[in-house]
Image: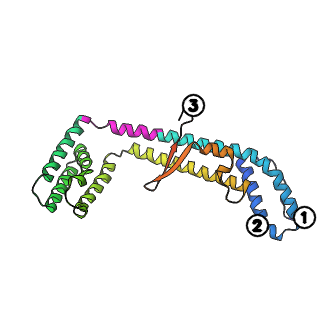
Amino acid sequence: MYNYGRKEQKTYWKDAFNEYKNTFNKAIEKQGIMTEFERQSVAEYLREQREQVRVRAIPGAVQEFNNSVEYFKARQSAEHTARAKEISRWDSANLFSEMQVAQMRLNTIFNSDLPGDDKLKAVKNLYAEAAASGNSYKKRAAAEQLLNVTSQASGDVMEKLPFNSLRTQAENDLENIRMTDELRQAQDNKMAAANEVYNKVKELDSIANTFHGGNATAAWEPEFAKALGQVEFGVSHGELIITVREPVKPGGSE
């Protein structure tokens, strides 16, 4: 007979749950070669253990999920702080002046009688000049203004296509220009925290599946569903996006 004997009580809910889950899975795997008495004994043991484990696993898993959400919120706040510091490092008057100069030079190019290829060459030269200047304000101003270069260019879609490449380059360059070590670290920390929240969701699904069977998800457990109601998941540019909903205040709305 397979030994599914009782063991000492686990003090950590995850240990107890994993033991129950392993026993459950092993019983499913071996049921074809067990005797009827063994199947009945295992079933009785699992019924006995299920609720004992469940009453510890449900609140324990919810607490860990809530903790991961709070940690994510803290890392998100840190990213906002780093972003605000990045914004404040720019002198607005200096930046505005450089953006005006860049826009005037672009207007001069696009209002000229130059053929399309020469206009493209002139815009590329303007951008290359700013990039080689070593002046972060000139670099940013040129990149910012090139974000609208497609709308300034004349012609059909095919004629504007080379300017689309310039705009894409400006978008990438602008991201690098405005990136600081602190902001990059804050973004990495937030992404790691977001992945941890997602991993906790998968853990809730695993627990629900073990207790309810089949394709059960976390939504099958009322406490899990309530916890999951705090967050909304999405994907943008291949990255996991988490939106945390603020709790509804009594007598108010979200």
**Place of residue 179 in the rendered image (x, y in percent of width and height, measured from the top left):** 35, 46
Q: Are marks 1 and 2 in contact (CB under 8 Å)?
A: no
Q: Position of residue 123 (x, y in %)?
A: 18, 55
Question: Which residue sits at x=59%, y=43%?
Answer: 229
Q: Residues within 10 Å of mark 2 (few under 14, many from 20)?
A: few
Residue at coordinates 75% horizontally, 50% vertically from top-left?
A: 16
Decide whether residue 91 is among the magenta residues.
Answer: yes
Q: Which residue is mark 2?
A: 29
Task: Select label 2 or label 3 by which is in front.
Answer: 3
Compute the Cα span from label 1 to label 3.
55 Å
User: Mark 1: few, some, or many residues within 10 Å (few <14, many ≥20)?
Assistant: few
Front-lying residue, 38 or 228? 228
Callout 2: helix, strand or loop? Answer: helix
- State left or right for residue 143 relative to residue 236: left
Residue 11 visible to the viewer: no
Q: Amino acid at mark 2?
A: Glu
* Identity of the residue furthest to the left in this view: 113
Which amino acid, mark 3?
Lys
Gap in angstroms between the C-alphas marked 1 and 2: 16 Å
Residue 219 visible in this rendered orientation of the protein: yes
| Quarter of the N terminus within the rendering | bottom right
Chain-order first, disc 1 or disc 2 = 2
Q: Are marks 2 and 3 in contact (CB under 8 Å)?
A: no
How many residues crowd around disc 3 within 10 Å: few (fewer than 14), some, or many (20 or more)? few
Q: Which residue is mark 3?
A: 249
What stretch of residues is rendered in magenta?
A: 77-92
Residue at the outermost bottom position:
33
Tally the numbered discs: 3
**Residue 37: numbered disc:** 1
For the residues labelled 2 and 3, the Cα–Cα distance comes to: 49 Å
Left or right of 192: which side holds 130? left
Residue kind at label 1, given as amino acid type: Phe
